[in-house]
Image (cartoon, grey):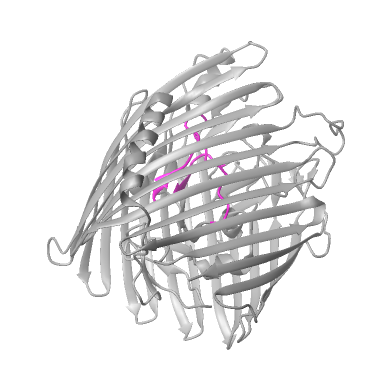
Amino acid sequence: MKLLMALLTLSLLPVISSIGYCEELAPADSSVRIYILDEVVVKIDRIFRPVTVSDYGLPVTIFSLREIEAVQIENAYELLNQVPGVTYKRSRQLVHGMGSTAKGFYRTRGIGEKPGAGLLIMVDGRPHYMGFWGHPILDNHPVDDVERVEVIKGPGSVLYGKEAFGGVVNLVTHRPKPGINTTINMSGGSYGNRGLRLYHAGGIGATTYRLNGSVKSSDGERPNSNQETRSASGRFTRELNSGMRLEVGCQYRWSEWFDPGPLDSPRGDGDSTGGGEFTGYGADITLHETIGLTHGQIILYADMLDNELYLDSKNYSDNLGLRVWQSWDGIWSGGELRLGLDYERYGGGWEMLDGSGETESYEDNTAPYIHLKQSVTPRLKLSGGIRVNFNSKFDTETAYRLGISADADEVTRIYTSLSRAFRTPSLAEQYFPYWAGDRTLLEPERMWQIEAGLHRMITGWCAVEACYFYAEGDNMIRKIGPPPRPPIAENTGTFTHRGVELSARAIPIERLSVYAGFAYLNPGHNTAHNPERTLFSEISYLSPKDVRLSFTVDHSAGRYEKSNRESALPDYTLLHTRLTVPMPGMPGHFGCKGWFAVNNITDADEELSSGYPLPGRTITVGLALRHSF
């Protein structure tokens, strides 16, 4: 696999040298965008972002570049807390950690075994996850090069594959315009937090490029809890001819973290056994096609990921994949057809440092799929699709979805969908039962979900969204350790999740934006780290001179550290504020912006896990310098 990765990387070199730099493809009127998920056309206002429901009857939440820049976050996933039904929490300043060392959670509607297995992370439409462990990489996606974040809740297996069992997050990176643009962003604050980010982009005519890098570190809120992350990436794009675009990308990611231990049993100074180090390399080639009403994409990608847990082990993951799809609009009256094929070879190995155990294994996964959309009337649209998954170690699995979207009037859209999803056990989950002496093979997770909701513009300045979902499945995979290590996985039988999600966004007066999102979840017996009630609200004011002041409230209640409502955790409410101020008077093509943020204003005490409290009040200041011509 490492040889394949090297060959792919070498194959990119002549392409990079021949295409030079990348180009922006967005239309001149940037208020209308066509997103990479290929099923959403969204109008974006500079301040107002209503919830979106696509013609597929699929609710999608989209965070624009302006929103990302306004909140001045370090990690793109911090936006997820604003989405009802999605929980992303971490008790550390910068990094989330890996596997059993992770002191945070990423869940969508109760799905996402620690630290997020069953939830697909994509960057520019290509998947990012650890092939051996089968979970996303939550530490190495800073916001430096992110232009848009797209969130789909619920089963996404038909269009996006088995890793999209419970939801999808797609990070869309910048596509620079011709010209030269450079940004330097510096920040510092409580607990020795400091960061330096560099973004540089440019191009001429049909070719453009983008380069960015970042270094972030923190001394940590407790002794022996320091962390550091580094990342670098580049993307080169060239318009080949009318309707064809070639993109080449490469990525480097590194992070190191240390675990101070629980409050009642802290690790001593210099004890690194609770820490770990992660290094990742990736490369991809993407060919886009848009000719009339025909759209297509081919993505070839590879990743090499090394992960060392200082306590006892090290492991590595390799991914090699190909994703191909082609869609035809108007192939018949009011119809759209999409055909696709995904192939992946993924795997890796684990080794205990004391020599007590090791393994290496790989799988091949091939999955063709078809998806249809039909406009019955201008107001009524039907959609449906099926994916058949062929895995080298498991029986054939099938995913499907049916959707209905209807415009009740000019300002109201109602929708419903029925979906079936699956996820095959990761290699780590398959292996560790054997390690423990259990010769019973794990079964794939399976789930079906029904969802119904509506999106309505109440007035020209207020939009609301409401939905109800019911999900039922079997063979949910849960880890029952450590201790003892390594973590042992088992199928937990049937499960039932149901819930209600509500959100509203309004501009009651010019330049004042108000948002509130609420979710109620009944996860049955799967209560571990699945809060029953969550609320996120924000009030934000943007002055005529682009000074932005915001206040947010993050509330969570009905929490348990274990399933079956065991080990109850206290409710919490966190308050945050952020101020962003552009600084005028810079000469020529220079620009400058300063920002100030206070998280956990009231210094509230809270624990995500027993013995691991959230950081107290945290103050951060930053300065961004920009130059363009």
Q: Main secondary structure of the magenta part?
A: loop
Q: Count how many numbered circles sit on residues in the image.
A: 0
Q: Please tell me which residue lies in front, 6 or 341.
A: 6
Farthest left residue?
332
Residue 314 picture location, percent across and down: 61, 23
Location of residue 524 in the rendering, given as x and y in whole percent from the top left corner: 58, 45
23 relative to 587 in the view: left or right: left
Quarter of the image for residue 185 reads bottom right
Q: Residue at x 48, y 86 (%)?
A: 459
Residue 523: x %, y % from top left: 57, 47
Furthest-bottom residue in view? 509
**Does the segment drawn in magenta span residue 126?**
yes
Q: Residue at x 64, y 21 (%)?
A: 313
Q: Is residue 371 visible?
A: yes
Whether the magenta-drawn stretch holds residue 156 is answered as no
Question: What span is colored magenta in the figure?
Answer: 116-144
52 relative position to 116: left or right? left
362 versus 245 height, above or below: above
Q: Quadrant of the N terminus?
A: top left
